[in-house]
Each structure stands twice: as C-alpha cells, then as structure tokens.
Amino acid sequence: MANDITGQTEPGHGKSGQTALMIGAVGVVFGDIGTSPLYAMKEALHHARAGTDPHLATYGVISLVFWAMVLLVTIKYVIFLMRADNAGEGGTLALMALAQKALGRYSPTVFFLGVCGAALFYGDSIITPALSVLSAVEGVKDAPGIGHSLDQYILPIAFVILIALFLAQSRGTEKVARLFGPIMLLWFVVIAGMGVYYIIQKPAILAALSPHYGLSFLLANGVTGFIILGSVFLVVTGAEALYADMGHFGKKPINRGWIWIVFPALMLNYLGQGALTLVDPTAQSNPFWRMVPEAFYWPVLILAGLATVIASQAVITGAFSMTQQAVQLGLLPRMDIRRTSETQAGQIFVPQMNTMLMIGVVFLVAIFKSSEALTSAYGIAVTGTMFISTIMAYIVIRKIWLWSRLRTLALLVPLGIIEAIFMASNLTKLLSGAWMPLAFGGILIFVMATWIKGSHILAAKATRDSLPLSDLVEMMKKRPPHRVAGTAIFLTSDADVAPVALMHNLKHNKMLHEKNVVLTVKTANTPRVDLDQRVTITPLNDDFTVVTLTFGFMETPNIPQALGICRKRGLKFDILSTSFFVGKRSVVPSANSGMPLWQDKLFIFLMKNAANPTEFFHIPPGRVVELGTQVTV
C-alpha cells in the first residue's frame, strides 16, 4: 500500500503511484455507489405523488440527491469519518475495536453495535449483487429494435452472471482486479458525458442544486415525500465502502477519487437524467436507459454489465474481509480462510461465506424478479450501518480527537437526524421487501450471540474444571513423570490453567516431553500487529514455557511462522520434530446450562462446522496429536 494511515505519500511513491492508487480505488471502492444511476432516479420519480408538478418533481429529486451525497458521503465519510481509522483500517468492526480501545475497557453496548453493524453489512452484501446485475440486464428492455422480445431471458441471464461470479471467487481476483479501475473509470466518463449532453439542452436544470427545491418537493408530496426519501437514499448506498476499504488504498486516493471523478460524474449524470425528463416527461419510466444514444446502446449496456459485476465483486470481497475480522474477534466460529494471492494480503476466499452469499443472492432474484421490486429491500441495511457508525464515531471523536461535547454533537447530531429520517423512510417499505435484510441481519445477530455466549460458557466451565498451571508445575517437581525427548506444544485459550490436552497426555500416556510450551493465540484490537510484538515468552521453569502469539483482527494466524520468531528470543526447537497437542472437545447439550436446549444444539452445530484448528492455524497435520474430552453446555 502506497499510503500510510495519515494519508501521506510514503517515500519512493510519487504522483504516478498516487494516481494508480486512485484509479484502483475508483474500481474497487466506488462500484456500488457508481452504479446507482441505473435505478435510483427512476425509483425516486416513480414514487412522486400523482398531480405533483413534473418540473418540481425533477428539480426536487435532484436537489435531494445532491444534498444527500454532500452531507452523508462528502462531509460524513470523506471529510470526517475516514480520519477515524484503526491503524489505517476502516469499517464497522474496525470502528468498534477502535471505540473499545478509546474507552479503555470492554463496553457491551459498543460490542453489540458492532455486531449489529456487521450483520447489516451482510444483508447489504446479498442485495447489492442481485440489484446491480439485475438492473443492468434489464437494460435490454429498452434496447433498439428488440422491444420486449428478450424480457423472458432477463432472469436466466442474471442467474448465469451471478452464479458464474460466485463460482469464480475461489480462483482469486488479483489479475481481473487490475482491470476494475480502468473499466470503472471509463464507466464514470461515459455516464458523465451522457449527462453533459442533456444538461446542454436544458441548462436550467443546474438550478436544481438549490436545497429550496428539495424542501418544496417534500412539502408538496406530504407523507409521500417522506416515502420518497427512501428511494433518494439509493444514491448513497455504497458510501460505507469508502470507509471499509480505506486500508486497501489509503485515505488520499479514495478522497481524490470521490472528489475529482466519482462525485462530479454521478451528479452530471443525475442532472442529465433530470434534464431529459424535462425535455421528454415519458422518460421518467427509465431515465438512465432512455438517455443512452441508440448507436451506443449495446456498448453502454455491456459496460453497465461489467460495472455491476465489479460492484458485486467489491461487496463480496468486503464480506470475506468482514468474515475474517468477525472470526478473529470471536463473533463467528473458525472458518476456512484461503489466500488467493501471494502478493496481495487482502485477497482471500471464504468458501462457507461464498456459498451462503450465492444462495442468498439467487434466492433474492428468484423472489423479487425485478430491480424495481428489489429497491424496496435495499437501503434499510445501509442506513442502519451508517447510523451505527455515527454513534460509535461519537466515542472516537470525544476520546481520541478530544473534541468538546458541544462540538462533537454539532457535527454528529445533524448527521444522525438525517440518517434516522432516511432509516424511518426505508422502514415504510417493510412489508414490500425491507423485512428481508432485517430478517437476515437478525438471524446473523442471533447466530453471533449464540456463538459468543456458548464460547463464554464453555470457557468458564473449562476454567472451573481445570487445574491452575502453576499448581501442576509444582506437582511435577514432587512427582516427575516419565520424560521423552523432543518438544511438545499445547494449544489453549487460557494460559493460566493446565491445557486439557496436557492433562490427558499425563493421564493416559503417563509421560512428559523434555520441553513443553503452553501456547495461547490472542487477537488484538488493531488490524495488524508488528512482528516485534507478535510473541511474548514467559518461562515458568526448565520444563515449561508460556508463549502468547498476538495477531491483528485483519491477519490470518499462522502459528509455525510466528514461532519462528521464538528462535531470536532464545526459545529454540525444531518445528519438524515438535508435536502439537490439541484438545478436541465433544460438546453435548444440557438443559441446566446458561442457554435453552435448542440454543445449545445450535451452538454445537456451529462448533461441528467450525474449521479444524490444525488448518486454521496452519499447523503441519503430521505433527498434530488430538486428545478428546466430553463437555456439556
């Protein structure tokens, strides 16, 4: 990454490097918000109350679109929230970890907000591919000379594109991603050019940037105006990506990409769509595709298809990254996380999450069948995530930036009120589709809560039933067991108590290795941990050493690689002749535990489907000894 967390160019990177990063950011970060012109304007105009002056409807919608992007994207994210980075990383979970660190203690409220934000993000992750691809494919309806003859193929084409997109994830996107930037740059140039063409025909449309028209339009539509806000919000969906992908590109490339390229291109296109509806009121039914010149219709349709695939890829990659963070922070069970690039740290593939997203996306397209129906489901997840980030930002601004309460509230209260209004507006679509992301998010929150609570119950029970490690060490001095050559490493989540695998080894094998390492893996509240802070070594005596490995929540824990650092610290052993002892717990439900029996069974199901620790921690399989025990929850 050519950018440090302050946004300053690193030594050796000039303007060309920054430009390349900006184009890369345009390809990855702005795919979602960049494809909003396909459906946002059409949806907002569609909900305008019958009898409303068409000119006021057009001017009002554009005014609302402009100020939504200024306030929620430019001011909130680009100017302020992107400064609230966690060692260069952004996003809901990174902000949660930063807020926890700022408080200096564990806060259940902040933790719950982070869990809700993550769950809503997953809801957004299944809607974005479905809506984006479907809205592009639907462009064939207005294709010259085609009419409605291809309508019956819209859904099959969308299914093929989406399924192919998910099946391609396992191969990685490193090579294809290099084309994302140029393709999206071309997309923004094309939609800006289309907009300019119609603005020239009706330059009076520029007056729509005045907030007066937006307010007048809302008042003229009464309650309907409130509902229209939910459609207007579609223009800022994807704004969270600016913050979430900050760690991949840095602040300056994203900020410059938005201010110099994306924002101007989007506004020119929205103004152009507005100008077209003034020239031809019938264009309100589908203003984006009606503004495409007939001679360039098919090239633009193909370009739109590519842009929506890129937008979908960006949100899928974001879901993989979110899953990695959630697993590291203990919100979800261990999952198989594969790296698809030897050079790009952010290129990962999570098979379980990929399958779940693919099923969800295909299900959505099959149920809703059109982009118009899907827009009702869109927005609520994004507004919820935005509102949560505003609440957590209060802690960061007060505790880390050291702003006064009055100054902090002066910034966040207006933004929070706007987001709350947008959220309430989207809730009016509850019965027509908005229930879906809320239901999906609610299920994920419940799954996370079950995993967290079950893990705590299991850890507490293990601590109660275990012997303190210090006591075991003293007992060994008095009654030393049979010794064998070599090194044994015992994995445990609590280094203060004797690992289950160690106790079973003594009980059944009645022997102890010459060197014994009690190994604990911890996750920090930072995205990455410096190598000099990776390993902590605490010798107990000549026989036992406690080693703690610390990884950031954006890192994949690799135990053999991290143990290589131990040699520099004086703890030497041959990894190829070392045995790793892992305790394998067989969990059975109990009606007397801290959870209902049915929730116990859900937790056990999650445990059984969790990734094997041997694979998750990249331990050589031939060096692992598993010792099982049965516990109840």
Image (tube, rainbow, N blue to C red):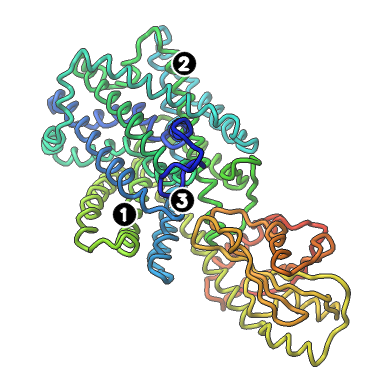
Instruction: Identify the residue shown where x is 45% and y is 53%.
Output: 118
Q: Quick check: 375 above or below 404? A: above
**Quadrant where the image shows the C terminus:** bottom right
Q: Earlier in the sequence, mark 3 or mark 2?
A: 3
Q: Quick check: 328 above or below 264? A: below
Q: Position of residue 613 (x, y in %)?
A: 69, 60
Of residues 354 and 267, the one nearer the viewer is: 267
Secondary structure under the numbered disc 3 in the rendered image: loop
**Which mark lies nearer to you, 3 or 2?**
3
Residue 444 falls left or right of residue 507:
left
Determine which of the numbered discs, if any, sits on residue 150 in the image. Answer: 2
Q: Quick check: 449 above or below 223? A: below
Determine which of the numbered discs, if any, sits on residue 14 in the image. Answer: none
Distance of mark 1 from mark 2, alpha carbons? 45 Å
**Which mark lies nearer to you, 1 or 3?**
3
Residue 205 falls left or right of residue 103:
left
- Tell which residue pokes out farthest to the front in this image: 11
Instruction: Identify the residue shown where x is 46% and y is 34%.
Output: 14
State the image quarter where residue 52 is shown: top left
Q: Position of residue 534 (x, y in %)?
A: 61, 62
